[in-house]
Image (spheres, grey):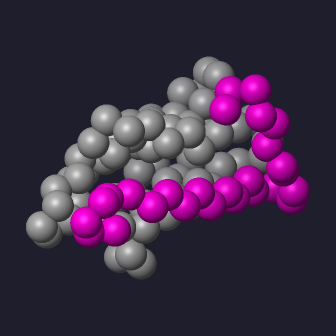
Amino acid sequence: MKIEFTIGSTEKIDVVIEKDWLTGGFTCTANGQVHTLRKPSESGTRSGLLLREVYTVEVGTTEKQVITIEHKGPFLFAAIRPHEYIVTVDGKVVAEYRGQ
């Protein structure tokens, strides 16, 4: 999964959010600076039939932006069923993704 977008009005920040479906590694890269959201070695906390995780990253130097990534995935057969990602910046939805 890969989501790309640009944010900021005075300070432009190119953001790339990537998740490796094989290893589970999850990163948010902002203007080349990598923020590790989840390491491949970390196990998830799963409860019920739906996995929901929320990650928050603050980016920018002169114009601070708060990026929030909400990941919803199925508990059962997660490797073959679609996952949902909703990305917000300062509370406004900037990207949505559904797939592996």
State whether residue 63 is above or below residue 74.
below
User: Could you tell me residue 82's position as x and y percent?
Assistant: 56, 43
Residue at 87 percent of width and 59 percent of height: 48
Q: Main secondary structure of the magenta part?
A: loop
Q: Is residue 99 visible?
A: no
Q: Quadrant of residue 16?
A: top left
Task: Check if residue 90 falls in the magenta segment.
Answer: no
Residue at 34 percent of width and 68 percent of height: 64
Q: Nearer the viewer, residue 36 or 72?
A: 36
Residue at 42 percent of width and 67 percent of height: 66
Task: Check if residue 63 falls in the magenta segment.
Answer: yes
Q: Is residue 90 visible?
A: yes
Is 11 on the left-hand or right-hand side of 20?
A: left
Residue at 16 percent of width and 56 percent of height: 12
Extreme-top residue of the structure? 22
Extreme-bottom residue of the structure? 91
Q: Nearer the viewer, residue 87 or 14?
A: 14
Is 57 on the left-hand or right-hand side of 73?
A: left
Extreme-front residue of the structure? 62
Image quarter in which the N terminus is found? top left
Is 43 on the left-hand or right-hand side of 61?
A: right
Q: Which residues are magenta?
A: 39-64
User: Could you tell me residue 72's position as x and y percent?
Assistant: 62, 55
User: Could you tell me residue 2's position as x and y percent?
Assistant: 38, 37
